Amino acid sequence: MIIIFCLLAACGGGGDGASDAFDVFDNVADLDVTLAEQLPTGSAEYRGKAVLDLPLGAQGADVSYVGDMAVSVDFSAADQPFTGMIDGLASDGQGPLDGQLVISNAIITPDASAVLDYQIAADVAGTLSGGGASYQLEGDLFGDFLGRNADATAGVIFGDITGPDGVNLFDGSYAAVID
């Protein structure tokens, strides 16, 4: 969980998006990883924020973008148990990005060791555009369910971003609470 807060700290302060993101991350900060036997059956909807550091600043400097995250979880599904999207990405200094990132191809490993592994692994991909340029993102999401009844989910996101200046790396974090 320390990594999540270190990545979020790079967000800098500023507008409502950053403030909302801090609120969501604060809400999950003290929650423990949900034990396998405490995971619910059935489905749940989560809403939260993602903070992505994208190399879109001057000379490829990282700029923190805050976006909305929506996730649907079917705890009993073998195929696509964790799906969703990230959209509405905006930065105080750079403005908004159009497009969305889709979360797919997930695997939930309920009994993953909280110290060594994540309970959730998924792909994140999509096209974003802004400032007259288009960017293709392909990456991974790793996270855990948090709280006694999987009340929240949080983790990290990282991968490749391809744009007019070639391929570069991005990273970030997310936190979402049950809706």
Image (tube, grey):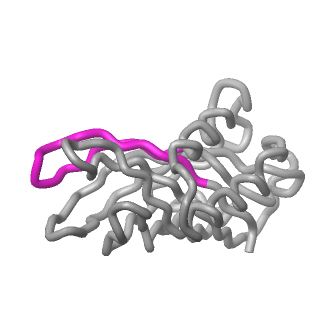
* Residue 132 seen in render: yes
- Residue sitting nearer the eye, 73 or 6: 6
Main SS, magenta region, reads strand
Q: Magenta includes 168?
A: yes
- Taking 54 as reference, is 27 left or right? right
Rendered-image quadrant of the N terminus: top right
Identified at 65% across, 70% down, the residue is 47
- Residue sitting nearer the eye, 178 or 108: 178
Q: Quadrant of residue 20?
A: bottom right
Identified at 63% across, 31% down, the residue is 117
Residue numbers of the magenta segment: 156-174
Residue 58: percent from left, percent from top: 22, 48
Residue 147: percent from left, percent from top: 84, 51
Rendered-image quadrant of the C terminus: bottom right
- Taking 111 as reference, is 63 left or right? left
Residue 22: percent from left, percent from top: 67, 56
Identified at 31% across, 74% down, the residue is 98
Please say if 132 is above or below 117.
below
* Residue 69 seen in render: no
